[in-house]
Image (spheres, coloured by chain):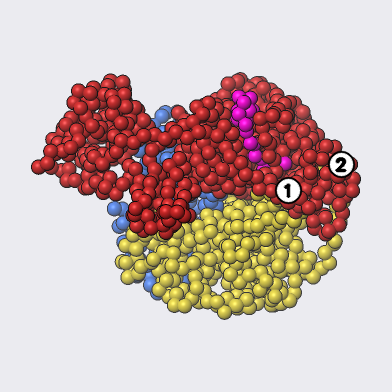
């Protein structure tokens, strides 16, 4: 078991309960021991930063300071919520630059008897932790019920891969970590170019028209490529697409009916856990119908006879082959059947 | 107090206001006259421009009239004017090596702003110069013969031009190219801006000239392995990779290529757009015309079977036993013209190159336009048949972008305009150019821009944010959508097109750093090779005898590359014409009586300049080979090696001078 | 906006001021007006000015027009602009700065967004955690009372699925947290 400090974030107690309920048994299964940071506070989401900068930084700083003080043998911090993950890594990285921000935050923290030395603890999103620290091989070993026949759209959202302060992702715009993970579970992963586009963030509250448009774009394209179910890694993404989908339909006259669940819920299913122990049923757009497709026959792809006129494609970057010992930043390219690459 | 034995003159330069704005030069001069009098300073003056003829005359007159025996000039870096003042001294009858130039511009006025401190530092530097100078000796320059042969590395257009200029002037040239044929990137293009000449039509005559010129030794499929020696006398080792083809027997008939059963995607010449065989020449007009065998992909080298090429070769020119060969020769000068690599557009995942099939990079598009390319010059989508109805060309891909390359790649605007013209002419499609700024500063370039505007190309000012296949509107379905802020109207636009061409920037060769090390020259932070002076000496390097031409020095287009190739050749030919050159007399020598014959220095010398005499059991330094680097001096356990101009006395005196209390 | 802002010292220094407030390495002054941000922004269609235009206005000293713009309030913090900006300008951070300046100077016209942020902040200051139900009801009652009926099924849905807590949770160290925030506010004002 590897022990990690767990920063749940406020949503995990409310709208993101299904995430919390599913990640707990799943993490245990793959050997991740989570130790909740005692008395953590809200990260401020995207709201506090727009009111007061230093207090917003100090608010996040308190969590980092608590984590450091409580680390005691635990390795690194893990946050399942992308917004929390972004805020934690951002402040850690700003403080590590030692250009005055660290002094300001520590000054504020000292008023509460706390302090924080940046760079001491690694900060992970739950997804990167599972892909890079636990590894896809371990995940595959635990799969007893492959998600065959389920067409999933990997929707990673913005705040996990951007701004990649902790340098954990294969790309900031088209990261493939969620594709790989869902593939390892046996699901059929659709090519979803909007995988890191915005779910609307806080816009449902302050500018609903903007939010409806963004939600519509995401769901519309998922439907276009015949997705059964969308998969989220962030409680805000899940909340917006799930809870506001009906309102979006009313507002835009659309008829979307696209379920979205957390990746840990699908991991649990693949690991053979029961739906109700994984928070299924709490989504407003029911995932029931989609889940029933698991195990269904996948129609075999007709092998297209290679068009004799077609021009070859360039090597894709990030085709899933990872160099050992990197955090996913360096991807190696296949070389078989290629000429000496002078311009690789 | 002893009477000083030398009579020293000190001259402080204002350099206009370059120095005098920060340093109180009058004060420095006055101080030197008073405080350094006991060291032998008999006169100290300041002058607005010491390097002017008036300034030089000042020195010359003082030498004659005051009988100066040593001269210190405090001005700019010795790189710039050391020679000027040494020559002035020589004219007045003083040995030029009794003149010392100390820098109070690069080392003081340009790097300090506090006037008081800067003035004090200038005094310390003048003092150190005076102290050191006392120990100078009169030296004589050494002349060495210059080998008239030249090594040109890289057979692109810059290297070809340099080679032909030298060969036509009667000098022997070795041209080394790592690919099977010369021609470089220019051989991949179809048309060249702004005149739209056919690239092959203007390039191949030059390639043929290189191939048949009696003064040129053409070594393709070869790489430089080692370079020793110094200007005038470089020892070069070149690895001639095994072609597995006996060139003396090969007629270039091409039957082996025809019979080879293995297709290999050609990542170099065809940039992954087309296939070649495992035995191949990269293109029909290749020079030389005999093929090479690609051992990584040859079926025989993989499985031990096949040998189709051998079976069918009418002249028995295939030789599977042929091995790499090391060629050694001597040259007097070297020109590096190793070119550029294209920026890898996959690094900008928002443009979808490598993911979206109808996104092409600039070299792919060049190949597509080329009559001998994968589509025989037809502009079509990746399916190989469909003609695009709308095409978007994106400028500055990987250039002017701090996440990738901060510099402007300089050729992309004109290249993109050329692409717009070709698309319009051959397909009639709507063409959009997405640019940040249009930069067309060459002769006839802005006229070309105007022509493209007149042809009806749409120009959108804005750096493209993303290329996507995620349609939002019905008219976007099955298209690539270019999302951009049209900054001239301040609105986000989504423009559906069928094809996107990325004008990817130019980058230093992936192995530029290793090559620079091999030839002893330096790279900028970006990786381009550094010229001796960005304005006054753009093709020389800080290493004597090594020159650079073309894109190896920075992104440039064909006319500029040719100009640099010719310029580098002219510089080299000038050296060759001199026949011999004077070498700085700064070198090491061994005091025979103190040498214990341990031979430590023999192996350390990077120029192989130290010989060991069995008879006397001592080492000796060949003055012509020694470059004065000082390695042996530092290494000698007996302190038996001494270096002119850098003796222990000189260095210690210089330090003492620097530490002088200048505040009083 | 037919009249140009007065070309005063205060206005000229606007960009410098915003850059400084954002942080020493915001790089705002290096903007080359390429429009990558405006092209990337998923909510650009609802912005009065694209981010690029806003930076041009900053440079021109158009203080009032900048601080009253809805642009920073429509920003969804997706960081597309930040990772694509060729000058590596920290655009989302600049947006946060502009929001806080607008709040401090009362320069914004529509208070929906800033009220939401302030409600959120007051929840955090009171409880140490955010409290979705309280936040939503308070905010919607004030700004979108007409939307409430259409929202009701969703609210009820979330409640019945136990995805909304009826009571806020308070952290134990709330006093400690407020001591830290108070000190931070002093530092911010300094």
Q: Which mark is residue B315?
A: 2
* Residue A219 visible in the current orientation: no
At label 2, counting other C-alpha atoms closer than 10 Å, the crowd grade (few under 14, some 14-19, many 20 or more) is few
At label 1, counting other C-alpha atoms closer than 10 Å, the crowd grade (few under 14, some 14-19, many 20 or more) is many
Residue at 45% in and 54% down: B615
Which colour denotes chain C?
Answer: blue
Which colour denotes chain A?
Answer: yellow
Q: Which mark is residue B242?
A: 1
Chain ID at mark 2: B
Q: Quadrant of residue B245?
A: top right
Q: Which residues are magenta?
A: B162-180
Whichever of labels 2 and 1 marks the residue nearer the N terminus, that label is 1
The front one of B582 and B99 is: B582
* Residue B270 visible in the current orientation: yes
> In the image, which lettered chain appears red?
B
Residue B428 percent coordinates (x, y): 76, 28
């Amino acid at each position: 078991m590897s022990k990690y400090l767990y920063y749940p974030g406020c949503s995990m107690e409310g709208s993101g309960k299904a995430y919390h309920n599913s990640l707990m048994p799943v993490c245990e299964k793959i050997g991740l021991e989570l130790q909740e940071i005692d008395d953590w506070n809200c990260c401020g989401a995207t709201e506090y930063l727009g009111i007061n900068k230093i207090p917003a930084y100090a608010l996040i700083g308190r969590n980092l300071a608590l984590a450091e003080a409580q680390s005691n043998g635990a390795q690194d911090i893990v946050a399942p919520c992308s917004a929390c993950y972004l805020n934690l890594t951002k402040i850690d990285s700003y403080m590590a630059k030692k250009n005055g921000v660290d002094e300001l935050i520590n000054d504020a923290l000292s008023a509460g008897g706390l302090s924080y030395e940046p760079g001491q603890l690694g900060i992970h999103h739950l997804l990167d932790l599972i892909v890079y620290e636990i590894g896809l091989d371990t995940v595959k070993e635990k799969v007893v019920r492959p998600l065959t026949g389920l067409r999933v759209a990997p929707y990673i959202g913005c705040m996990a891969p951007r701004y990649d302060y902790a340098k954990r992702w294969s790309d900031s715009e088209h990261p493939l970590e969620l594709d790989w993970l869902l593939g390892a579970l046996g699901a059929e992963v659709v090519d979803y170019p909007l995988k890191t586009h915005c779910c609307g963030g806080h816009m449902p509250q302050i500018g609903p028209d903007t939010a409806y448009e963004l939600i519509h774009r995401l769901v519309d394209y998922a439907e276009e490529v015949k997705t059964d179910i969308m998969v989220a890694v962030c409680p805000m993404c899940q909340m917006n697409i799930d809870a506001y989908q009906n309102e979006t339909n009313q507002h835009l006259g659309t008829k979307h009916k696209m379920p979205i669940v957390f990746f840990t819920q699908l991991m649990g299913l693949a690991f053979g856990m029961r739906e109700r122990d994984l928070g299924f049923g709490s989504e407003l757009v029911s995932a029931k119908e989609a889940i029933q497709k698991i195990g269904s026959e996948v129609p075999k792809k007709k092998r297209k006879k290679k068009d004799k006129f077609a021009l070859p494609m360039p090597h894709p970057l990030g085709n899933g082959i990872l160099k050992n010992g990197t955090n996913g930043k360096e991807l190696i390219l296949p070389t078989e059947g290629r000429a000496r690459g002078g311009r690789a | 107090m002893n009477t000083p034995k030398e009579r020293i003159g000190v001259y402080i330069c204002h350099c206009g206001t370059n120095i005098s704005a920060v340093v109180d030069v009058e004060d420095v001069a006055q101080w030197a006259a008073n405080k350094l009098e006991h060291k032998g300073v008999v006169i100290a003056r300041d002058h607005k421009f010491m390097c002017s003829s008036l300034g030089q005359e000042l020195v010359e007159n003082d030498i004659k009239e005051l009988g100066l025996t040593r001269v210190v000039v405090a001005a700019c870096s010795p790189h710039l004017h050391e020679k000027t003042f040494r020559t002035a001294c020589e004219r007045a009858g003083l040995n030029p090596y009794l003149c010392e130039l100390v820098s109070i511009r690069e080392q003081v006025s340009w790097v300090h702003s506090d006037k008081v401190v800067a003035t004090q530092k200038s005094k310390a530097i003048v003092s150190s110069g005076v102290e050191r100078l006392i120990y100078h000796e009169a030296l004589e320059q050494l002349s060495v013969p210059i080998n008239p042969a030249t090594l040109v590395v890289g057979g692109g257009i810059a290297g070809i031009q340099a080679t032909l200029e030298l060969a036509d002037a009667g000098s022997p040239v070795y041209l080394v190219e790592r690919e099977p044929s010369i021609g470089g990137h220019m051989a991949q293009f179809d048309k060249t801006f702004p005149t739209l000449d056919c690239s092959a039509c203007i390039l191949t005559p030059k390639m043929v000239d290189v191939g048949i010129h009696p003064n040129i030794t053409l070594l393709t499929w070869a790489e430089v392995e080692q370079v020793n020696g110094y200007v005038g006398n470089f020892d070069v080792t070149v690895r001639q990779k095994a072609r597995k083809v006996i060139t003396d027997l090969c007629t270039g008939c091409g039957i082996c290529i025809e019979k080879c059963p293995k297709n290999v995607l050609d990542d170099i010449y065809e940039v992954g757009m087309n296939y070649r065989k495992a035995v191949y020449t990269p293109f029909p007009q290749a020079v030389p015309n005999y093929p090479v065998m690609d051992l990584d992909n040859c079926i025989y080298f993989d499985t031990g079977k096949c040998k189709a090429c051998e079976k069918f070769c009418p002249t028995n020119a295939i030789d599977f036993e042929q091995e790499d060969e090391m060629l050694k020769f001597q040259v007097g000068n070297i020109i590096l013209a190793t070119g550029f690599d294209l920026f890898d557009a996959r690094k900008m995942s928002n443009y979808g190159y490598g993911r979206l099939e109808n996104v092409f990079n600039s070299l792919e598009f060049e190949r597509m336009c080329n009559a001998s390319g994968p589509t025989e010059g037809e502009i079509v989508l990746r399916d190989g048949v469909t003609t695009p109805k709308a095409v978007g060309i994106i400028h500055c891909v990987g250039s002017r972008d701090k996440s990738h390359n901060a510099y402007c790649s300089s050729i992309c605007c004109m290249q993109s305009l050329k692409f717009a013209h070709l698309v319009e002419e051959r397909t009639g499609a709507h063409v959009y150019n997405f640019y940040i700024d249009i930069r067309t500063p060459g002769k006839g370039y802005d006229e070309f821009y105007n022509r493209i505007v007149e042809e009806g190309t749409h120009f959108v000012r804005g750096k493209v944010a993303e290329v996507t296949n995620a349609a939002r509107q019905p008219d976007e379905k099955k298209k690539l959508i270019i999302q951009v802020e049209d900054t001239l109207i301040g609105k986000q636009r989504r423009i559906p097109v069928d094809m996107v061409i990325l004008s990817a920037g130019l980058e230093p060769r992936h192995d530029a750093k290793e090559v620079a090390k091999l030839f002893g020259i330096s790279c900028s932070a970006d990786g381009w090779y550094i010229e001796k002076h960005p304005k006054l000496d753009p093709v020389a390097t800080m290493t004597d005898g090594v020159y650079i031409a073309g894109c190896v020095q920075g992104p440039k287009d064909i006319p500029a590359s040719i100009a640099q190739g010719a310029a580098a050749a002219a510089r080299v030919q000038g050296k060759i014409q001199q026949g011999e050159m004077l070498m700085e007399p700064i070198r090491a020598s061994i005091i025979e009586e103190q040498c214990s014959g341990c031979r430590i220095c023999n192996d350390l010398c990077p120029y192989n300049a130290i010989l060991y005499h069995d008879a006397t059991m001592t080492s000796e330094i060949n003055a012509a080979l020694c470059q004065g680097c000082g390695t042996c001096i530092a290494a000698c356990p007996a302190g038996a090696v001494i270096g002119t101009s850098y003796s222990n006395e000189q260095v210690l005196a210089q330090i003492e001078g620097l530490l002088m209390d200048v505040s009083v | 906006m037919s009249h140009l802002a007065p070309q005063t010292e205060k206005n000229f220094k606007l960009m410098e001021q915003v850059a400084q407030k954002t942080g020493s390495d915001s790089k705002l002054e290096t903007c080359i007006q390429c429009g990558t941000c405006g092209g990337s922004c998923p909510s650009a269609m609802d912005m009065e000015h694209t981010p690029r235009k806003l930076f041009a206005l900053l440079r021109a000293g158009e203080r009032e027009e900048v601080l009253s713009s809805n642009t920073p309030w429509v920003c969804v913090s997706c960081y597309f602009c930040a990772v694509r900006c060729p000058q590596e300008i920290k655009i989302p951070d600049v947006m946060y700065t502009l929001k806080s300046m607008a709040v401090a100077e009362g320069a914004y016209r529509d208070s929906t967004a800033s009220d939401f942020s302030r409600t959120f902040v007051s929840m955090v200051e009171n409880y140490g955690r955010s409290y979705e139900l309280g936040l939503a009801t308070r905010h919607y009652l004030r700004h979108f009372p007409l939307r409430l009926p259409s929202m009701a099924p969703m609210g009820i849905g979330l409640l019945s699925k136990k995805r909304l807590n009826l009571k806020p949770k308070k952290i134990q160290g709330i006093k400690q947290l407020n001591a830290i925030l108070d000190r931070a506010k002093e530092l911010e004002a300094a």
